[in-house]
Image (cartoon, grey):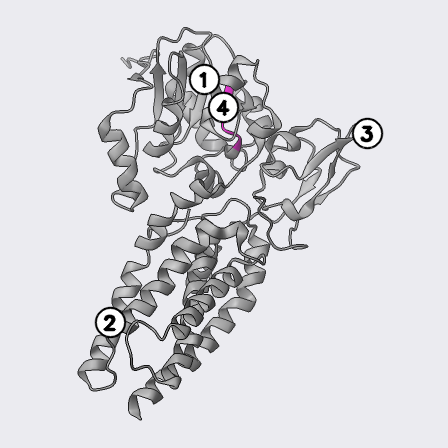
């Protein structure tokens, strides 16, 4: 059974002018957001993106941009309560 | 005269692909939250089987469940395992936090002097480590080339034997019913503390004569908790809708309706109290289901934030109204 989450929320952007078609983003993306087309990588399904930031971090040409973050409600609540950036800090025994 | 020792000792720890009963018990305990935050192996270089300088180097996290999951897949195999110090956190979460990251990998390569142990320049990293590691920086600063292996350890042998080629399937994160089921004990355990506080408050209300709260209330609440933290995660893709809070609310609502139709297990139940629980219990399930976003593999920060902005105020209003109804019910 396929999982699908909210649509039109991901902050992922591609500057195709900078893309050289090296294919690194296809390699690291855990959700098949990219495909190779005419020697360049294109975003084929943005709604599958989980904003993990793997593609951005591993793009040698800085063609990708995303606001990376954790898709974790507990972390976001903790961030609100403590006034810090939500991080995947599970030391209180909840989440991941 | 200063005596500078140029040759530091290279420390290599032995390990094997055999898991002991203790390893299996340890993993089970961690799933239930026992000693989970301190379930670690020492970072460093490990020798599995009888690797020579040409043997592959696999990089992993120092959460013991992660380390065990990797080595148990390496039967009859010779490899080096480089364990990073991720503070006892798995690869995916540690990569998100940056502890499974570029700096730690570069440091660890230097500490274990990997270039004096192996004759090649290739590191195999789990694909899910990619959000913490910048492959081109590793190459630039250490000379080692990072190859991202499969998502799951069970594919690692096939990946290496096929000349470091990952199939689409190896590259894809899945989230099967079993994957979800093994995550539910920790979800359940993490509700215990707040649940005990709620029981304490109800007990105090009983003492001061507001109530009485008893077995029926307990049963209704525990049902909502199990629905939010176990049933919703397991049934996740089959529940209509997309937002986790909605999915939990939906099942929680069904739980209350089914109970109302069946007349609850115990007899007297006023309309006011029933309405109160209809407002309180579905949001309880919704909240717990929403917290499962952190355990899931397919939610994004922007998505979770969007659903929370709607769900949290709705939950607070609903629970507040429900609590008023139940208190009013106690006074009349």
Point out the stretch of residues depicted in magenta: B123-127
Quick one: SS at disc 4?
Answer: helix
**SS majority, magenta:** strand
Q: Quadrant of residue B330?
A: bottom left
Q: Chain of mark 2?
A: B
Q: Is the residue marked by circle 2 packed among few (<14), some (14-19), or many (20+) residues within 10 Å?
A: few
For marks 2 and 4, give the one nearer the viewer: 2
For marks 1 and 3, give the one nearer the viewer: 3
Report whether residue B39 is seen: no
**The C terminus of chain B - image quarter:** bottom left
What residue sits right under mark 1 in the picture? B57
Magenta stretch: residue B92 in it? Answer: no
Mark 3–mark 4 Cα distance, whole angstroms, equals: 30 Å
What residue sits right under mark 4 in the picture? B155
Please report whichever mark, 2 or 4, sits nearer to the chain's N-terminal start: 4
Q: Nearer the viewer, residue B168 or B119?
A: B168
In the displayed image of the protein, which residue is found farthest to the left? Answer: B207
In the displayed image of the protein, which residue is found farthest to the bottom? Answer: B332
Mark 3–mark 2 Cα distance, whole angstroms, equals: 66 Å
Quick one: SS at disc 3?
Answer: loop
């Amino acid at each position: 059974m396929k999982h699908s989450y909210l649509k039109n929320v991901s902050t992922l952007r591609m500057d195709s002018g900078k893309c050289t078609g090296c294919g690194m983003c296809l390699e690291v993306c855990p959700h098949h957001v990219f495909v190779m087309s005419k020697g360049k990588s294109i975003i084929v399904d943005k709604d599958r993106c989980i904003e993990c930031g793997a593609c951005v971090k591993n793009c040698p040409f800085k063609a990708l941009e995303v606001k990376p973050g954790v898709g974790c409600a507990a972390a976001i609540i903790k961030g609100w309560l403590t006034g810090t950036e939500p991080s995947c800090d599970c030391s209180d025994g909840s989440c991941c | 005269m200063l005596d500078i020792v140029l040759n530091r000792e290279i420390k290599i720890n032995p390990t094997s692909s055999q898991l002991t009963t203790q390893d299996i018990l340890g993993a089970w305990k961690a799933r239930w939250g026992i000693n989970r935050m301190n379930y670690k192996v020492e970072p460093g270089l490990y020798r599995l089987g009888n690797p020579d300088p040409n043997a592959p180097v696999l990089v992993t996290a120092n959460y013991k469940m992660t380390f065990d999951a990797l080595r148990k897949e390496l039967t009859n195999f010779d490899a080096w395992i480089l364990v990073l110090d991720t503070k006892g956190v798995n690869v995916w979460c540690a990569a998100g936090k940056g502890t499974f990251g570029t700096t730690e990998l570069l440091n660890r390569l230097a500490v274990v002097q990997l270039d004096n142990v192996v004759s090649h320049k290739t590191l195999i990293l789990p694909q899910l480590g990619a959000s913490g590691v910048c492959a081109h920086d590793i190459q630039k600063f250490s000379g080692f080339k990072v190859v991202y292996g499969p998502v799951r350890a069970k594919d690692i042998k096939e990946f290496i034997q096929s000349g470091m080629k990952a199939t689409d399937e190896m590259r894809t994160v899945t989230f099967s019913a079993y994957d979800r089921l093994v995550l539910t004990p920790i979800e359940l355990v993490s509700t215990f503390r707040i649940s005990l506080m709620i029981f304490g408050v109800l007990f105090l209300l009983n003492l001061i004569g507001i109530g009485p709260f008893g077995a029926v209330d307990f049963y209704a609440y525990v049902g909502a908790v199990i629905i939010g933290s176990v049933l919703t995660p397991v049934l996740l893709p089959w529940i209509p809708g997309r937002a986790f809070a909605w999915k939990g609310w939906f099942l929680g609502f069904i739980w209350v309706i089914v109970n109302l139709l069946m007349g609850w297990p115990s007899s007297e139940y006023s309309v006011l109290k029933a309405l109160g629980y209809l407002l309180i219990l579905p949001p309880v399930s919704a909240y717990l289901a929403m917290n499962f976003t952190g355990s899931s593999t397919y939610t994004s920060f922007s998505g979770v934030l969007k659903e929370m902005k709607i769900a949290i105020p709705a939950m607070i209003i609903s629970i507040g109204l429900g609590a008023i109804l139940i208190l009013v019910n106690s006074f009349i």
